[in-house]
Image: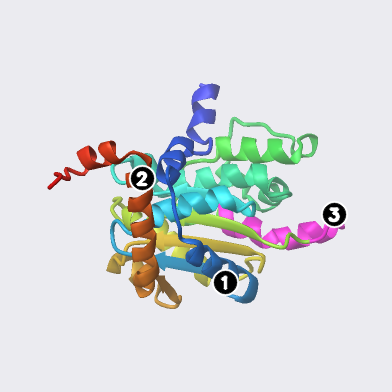
Amino acid sequence: MVASVFNRFAPIDFTRYIDRLTERFIGREWLFEQIDHWLQQGNEQFYLLTGEPGVGKSAIAAKLIQLCNDIAAYHFCRAGDVKTVRPGRVLRSLAAQLGKTLPHYGEALAKTIDPIHLRIEVNINIESLSNSQVTGIYIENLKESDPREELEILLRAPLALLTDLYAEHNQPLPTLKLLLIDSLDEAVTTTGRDNIAILLAALSQAEGLPTWIRFILTARPDLRVLEQFESLRLYKLEELLAQNLEDIERYVQNRVHSNPKSFVRKHHIHPV
């Protein structure tokens, strides 16, 4: 029983998915430079990258995870994979990652969580536990609840407290920490009143988030998503079509040169 509960609230493992997305990845330096400029110069906390199907949003997100050491948590919403679009499961996966990558997140969670959200049979002496242990136990034993409650419990409230905790511990604030969520258009397909796109849109309007916490989101130009983020500036891949085409050409040339016969067979190209 304990093992099954632990597995249920462990971070979702996207390792193989990321490896597959980034295999033979080429180009997009111009986009990574744009994102870096946004991180260094802008004051926006949410970056929403949109693009039509097939332009490489998920591959870009996966490559960014490999390149950027400041990503504290990430998630991919995947078509046909229920656990990756269910709001509560997404939030718990993100929280489980933050417990491992973000100092004092566990302490913040312990200080902000309402005891009524814990199972009554669980008896925990918070003072006897380390930061990471508190994170794990609370996530494992959190009651099933409304997605908006879980958003408050697992993300907004503990993140809002972190700046004060760093001051209490006489530690400098992190320069930057990122949460990356890919394919919000897949998230809106789940049933129920709320989905992760709606919840993140609510979080983007919430007060108290540390300025050093940033969110990078990707989505197709689906109105069900875009309507939730009307107040945000959209970063559109299509507006940089010339660079996209150059990257595609480089990718094709690389595949042809590395294994021309295999490429011809795979893409049904018939020699003249």
Prevailing secondary structure of the magenta residues: helix
- Seen in the image, is 158 located left or right of residue 198? right
Q: Which residue is at a point 21% across and 44% down the rendered structure image?
A: 267
Up-down relation of residue 136 to residue 240 (above or below): above
Between the C-alphas of marks 3 and 2, the distance is 56 Å
- Seen in the image, is 189 located left or right of residue 136? left
Name the residue carrying label 3. Answer: 169
Q: Earlier in the sequence, mark 3 or mark 1?
A: 1
Which quarter of the figure has residue 135?
A: top right
Residue 199 vs residue 152, the one in the foreground: 199
Q: Earlier in the sequence, mark 2 or mark 1?
A: 1
Between the C-alphas of marks 3 and 1, the distance is 30 Å
Query: Helix, strand, or loop for circle 3?
Result: loop
Hey, what amino acid is under mark 2?
His
Q: Earlier in the sequence, mark 3 or mark 2?
A: 3
**The label number, if any, that marks residue 38 in the structure image:** 1
Residue 172 vs residue 138, the one in the foreground: 172
**The label number, if any, that marks residue 272 in the structure image:** none
Name the residue carrying label 2. Answer: 257
Specify the segment rendered in magenta: 154-172
Hey, what amino acid is under mark 3?
His
Q: Which residue is at a point 38% across and 56% down the rendered structure image?
A: 250
Q: Are marks 2 and 1 in contact (CB under 8 Å)?
A: no
Up-down relation of residue 46 to residue 78 (above or below): below
- Seen in the image, is 216 located left or right of residue 43? left
Which residue appears farthest toward the front when viewing the image? 272
